[in-house]
Amino acid sequence: MLLKITNLHASIKGKEILKGINLVVNKGEVHAIMGPNGTGKSTLASVIAGRDVFDVTEGEVLYNAKNLLTLSVEERAREGIFLGFQYPVEIPGVSITNFMRTAVNEIRKYRGLDPMGAGEFLKMMEEKKKLVEITSNLTNRSVNEGFSGGEKKRNEIFQMAMLEPTLAILDETDSGLDIDALRVVANGVNKLRTSENGFVVITHYQRLLDYIIPDFVHVLFEGRIVKSGGKELAMELEEKGYDWIKQQL
Amino acid sequence: MGSDSNNIIDAYTSGEYKYGFHTDIETEYAPIGLNEDTVRYISAQKNEPAFLLEYRLKAYRHWLTMKMPTWPHLEIPPIDYQGIIYYAAPKKKKELSSLDEVDPELLETFNKLGISLEEQKKLSGVAVDAVIDSVSVKTTFSETLAKHGIIFCSFSEAVKNHPDLVKQYMGSVVPYTDNFFAALNSAVFSDGSFCFIPKGVRCPVELSTYFRINAANTGQFERTLILAEEGSYVSYMEGCTAPQRDKNQLHAAVVEIVAMKDAQVKYSTVQNWYPGDKNGKGGIYNFVTKRGICKGSNSKISWTQVETGSAITWKYPSCILLGDNSVGEFYSVAVTNNYQQADTGTKMLHLGRNTKSTIISKGISAGRSNNSYRGLVRISKNAVNSRNYSQCDSLLLGDKCGAHTFPYIQTENKSSIVEHEATTSKISEDQLFYCQQRGIDTESAVGLIVNGYAKEVLKQLPMEFAVEAQKLLSISLEGSVG
C-alpha cells in the first residue's frame, strides 16, 4: 500500500475544507479525482504535499506505512512525493537546470547517495527531455519565467520525470492546455507509469482521462469522496454532469 | 538557523581573543585621538616625503571644518573621533601550527564558502604552507607583472618608489575636500594599494589584493590608486568572501581610478566585514569613497560590488565620464540582514559627449535591516547624445525590513536619454513551497531565489569571485526566512 488516507479533516483559517477523506492508493495504480470547483481537490493535493497554511484537524495519512503528517514538505518530497502544480510559480534568474540539479542532489543526499556529477546529470536531463518531448531551450530558461501555460505544465511533467517520484499528484495539470500540450502531458504520465509507483490525477474534466486511463475514479464533493468507481464513472460524469451527483446526495 | 550563522560569525570574531591572536606582540601605536601631532606621527612613522605630510595636514585642517553627513538614510551612533587610535604599526599575529587548532565552526564557514585549504590556513592565521607563501609564487606573479611594466604594490611602497605618480594623481579624483570621510582618510590613511598599467598593456592576470604582500594588515583607513594608461586594461579584485573582522569599528577608505584614452578598468569588490550580531551589537562602520574618472575618450570604468557585511555601509562608487564616448558601469548587490544598514549606490557624472552609463542595483533586505539605493545621474550641457539606463530592484525577506530608493536625475541637454526602472518584490510563500516540494529545504531555496535575483550582477564578477559570492549570499541570509 502506497498511500492510505483515513478520515482526513483539514481546514484553512478555521474553515473546514476536507471533511473526512478516505482513500487508498496502491503501487501501480492511477487514481483520478474529479469534482466541481471549490470542493477541496487542490486542498487535498496541498495537504498531502504538506503545505502549512492548512491545518489537519483529524485523521491519518500513511505513506509507505510512515506517518506522513509529521514530515516537512521537503522530507515528503525526498521520500518520493511529487506535486504537479496547478499554477507553477516563476523563479526569476534560476535556470531549470540549476533548479533540478539542486533538487536531485538534495534528494540524493537524503537517501544517502553522493551528488550527481555534472556530466551524469546533463545526460539524465537529455534522456528525460526526450522522454517527455521537451525542446532543449526550455531547460536553459529561468524556472517558469515567461512560460506559456502549456510550457509551465510541460515543465512540471519534465520535473516529475527527473525526480522519479513514487507517488505523483497532478493538480489540474490539464487545465488551460490545448490538445497537443494535453497529449504531451498525458504521454509523459503514461511513460512514467510503472508497477512501482502510483498517480493521483486531479482533474475537472473527463478530457484528460481519454489519454490517461485511470484504474479508479473518485468524485470529491464538499470535502468528501462521495462516489468511487472505475474509469466508466468518468464517462458517466461527463454525460450527466456534476448535478447528477448532487441529486444523488 | 539564524543563531547558527550568527554563532559562526561570533565564533570567528571572538576567535581573535579565544585563540590568542591578540597576544602581546610588540606593537607601536599612535597616541589616542586625532590632532596635528597624530598626523605628523603617522607621516613620520612611514618616512613620508614632505608633500605627503603637507597633504595630510591640509586634509586634517579641512576635516576640522566639516561635519558628518546627515543626509544618508542611516542611523549612525555618535562616533568619538578622539577615542580612536589612528595608527598601529603592522603587528604580527600569533601563528597556529595547524588547522586542527582553529575553531571547527570557522572552518565550517570556510567550507561552505568553498575556500581552499591553503586559503583557509592563511585566513585563520595558521602558519602558511610553503606552497602559497613560498617566495616562488609571489615572485612568479611579480615577474609576470614586471615583464609587462605593471606596478602593483602597497601604497607606502608607491610613495617611496613612485612619488611623482602619487603626487600627480592622489586626490585628483577624490580631493580631500570631497566629503567628511574622504578628508579624514586623507589625513590619517595608513596604507593601501597602488596599481599602474602602462600604455597599451592588457594586464594578463586579475589583480587581487590577496596576492599583494602585506595585504592582511591594510588597516582601517585604506587608500587605493589605480592608474590605467592609454589603451590599457586591468581587472582588479578587492576583498575576500571569508568573514573579516577588524577590531577597528570605523573604516573609511578612499579608492581613486584614472582611465586614460581607450583604457578599461574593471573593479570588483566583495565586502564581508563583520556585520554585528543578530541584535545589532557591534559590527563595522564602512564609510567608503570610491570614484573613477574616465579621463580619455572611449575609456571605461566598471564597478561591481557584492556588499554583505558591515553594520553600516555608506558607499557610492562613482564615475566621472569626462572623455567623449566614455562608459561607466555600476553593478551592485547589497544584502542587509538583522540590524544592518546600507545606503549605497552610485554617481554617474556625464561631462563628455556620447557618454554612456549603466546602473544595475539589487538590494536584498532581511531581518530588521534597512537597505537604500541612492544614485545620481547628471548629464551636463555638453554631454550631448548621452545615455543612462538604471535599474534598481529591491527584494524583501520578511516584513520588518525596509527597502528605499533615492534616484536623482539631472539632465541639462535635450539630446540625451535617461531611463530609470525600479521594482520591489518579496520572496513569496508560493516560491518557497514550490522549491520545498522539489526536495529543497528553506535555506537552500532562499539561496537559489536570491542568487537568481542577483544573477545580472553576479555574472559581472570574475570567475574567482563569482562562485564564492553566490555561496556568500546564501550564507548571509541564513535563518532570515521561516
Image: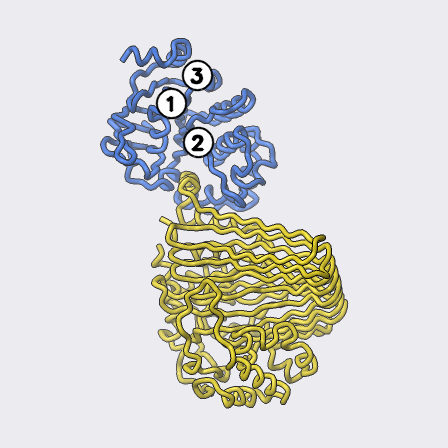
Chain colours: A blue, B yellow
**Residues at discs 1 and 3 both on one chain:** yes
Q: Residues within 10 Å of mark 1 (few under 14, many from 20)?
A: few
Q: Pointer 2 and pointer 1: residues touching (CB < 8 Å)?
A: no
Residue at the (45%, 77%) spot, across then down:
B95
Q: Secondary structure at mark 2?
A: strand
Per the image, the residue denoted by label 1 is A37
Looking at the picture, which amino acid does disc 2 mark?
A: Gly
C-alpha separation, residue under disc 1 versus residue under disc 3 = 14 Å
Question: Which is more toward the observer, B424 or B68?
Answer: B68
Q: Which mark is residue A84?
A: 2
Q: Pointer 2 and pointer 3: residues touching (CB < 8 Å)?
A: no
Chain identifier of the residue bearing label 1 in the image: A
Comparing marks 2 and 1, which lies closer to the viewer? 1
Per the image, the residue denoted by label 3 is A206
Q: Please, is residue B79 above or below residue B462 in the view?
A: below
Comparing marks 1 and 3, which lies closer to the viewer? 1
Chain identifier of the residue bearing label 3 in the image: A
Q: Residues within 10 Å of mark 3 (few under 14, many from 20)?
A: some
C-alpha separation, residue under disc 2 versus residue under disc 3 = 18 Å
Q: Secondary structure at mark 1?
A: loop
Q: Please, is residue A234 above or below residue B143 in the view?
A: above
Q: Residues within 10 Å of mark 2 (few under 14, many from 20)?
A: many
